[in-house]
Image (spheres, helix red, strand yellow):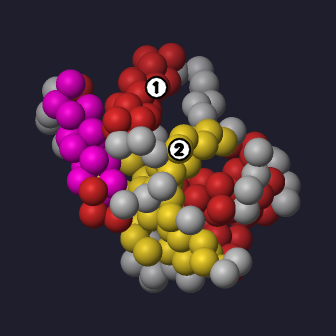
């Protein structure tokens, strides 16, 4: 099974394309896609949509794994991230991908075994569970890989 995993955002979008063959997960591609702060919000959403659709065409995944939103105290940011998430889900649905959604708790449990794990712990475990290039340093990119691992592990 090949999936595209997304850690949604409007400034930074973590992206991972992963595959599970013969019981072994592999990372085919990952990136932290950034939109310029100087762009309008609608233009940033358009950029995200185009990037996700480009990657879907290139990698031909069968599913999207995406994190559900954790609402913090900044409601304006949460709403904007929600809109960016909607663009990603739309692109996946438009391309007939199965859509799997995971809470941050599910992702942390799948990767570390502990639902209250810190970002550093998640990052360390991701790097132990799957071969990740040395240039992968962005939290958003690591989070996308973690979301992909949760999906490929069959977490529900």
Which residue is nearer to you in this view: 50 or 132? 50
Residue 47 lies left or right of residue 94; in this view the side is left
Per the image, the residue denoted by label 1 is 82
Residues at marks 1 and 2, CA–CA distance in whole angstroms: 19 Å
Most common secondary structure along the magenta stretch? helix
Q: Which portion, as a residue range, is magenta?
A: 42-56
Per the image, the residue denoted by label 2 is 98
User: Which of the image's four quarters has the N terminus?
Assistant: bottom right
Residue 62 included in the magenta stretch of the image:
no
Residue 44 included in the magenta stretch of the image:
yes
**Residue at 51% across / 51% down in the picture?**
63
Which residue is nearer to you in this view: 125 or 56? 56
Mark 1 secondary-structure assignment: helix
| In the image, residue 95 above or below residue 71 | below
Counting from the top left corner in percent of width and height, residue 138 is at 45, 62
Counting from the top left corner in percent of width and height, residue 135 is at 40, 78
Residue 140 lies left or right of residue 25; in this view the side is left
Mark 2 secondary-structure assignment: strand
Farthest residue, direction right: 114
């Amino acid at each position: 099974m090949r999936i595209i995993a997304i850690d949604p955002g409007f400034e930074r979008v973590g992206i991972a394309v992963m595959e599970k063959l013969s019981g072994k997960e592999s990372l085919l591609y990952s990136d932290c896609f950034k939109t310029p702060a100087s762009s309008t919000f609608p233009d940033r959403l358009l950029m995200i949509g185009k990037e996700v659709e480009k990657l879907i065409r290139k990698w031909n995944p069968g599913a999207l794994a995406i994190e559900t939103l954790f609402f913090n105290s900044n409601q304006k940011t949460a709403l904007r991230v929600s809109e960016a998430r909607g663009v990603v889900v739309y692109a996946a649905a438009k391309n007939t991908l199965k859509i799997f959604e995971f809470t941050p708790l599910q992702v942390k449990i799948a990767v570390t075994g502990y639902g209250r794990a810190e970002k550093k712990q998640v990052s360390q475990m991701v790097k132990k569970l799957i071969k990740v290039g040395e240039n992968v340093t962005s939290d958003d990119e690591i989070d996308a890989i973690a979301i992909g691992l949760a999906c490929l592990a069959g977490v529900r």
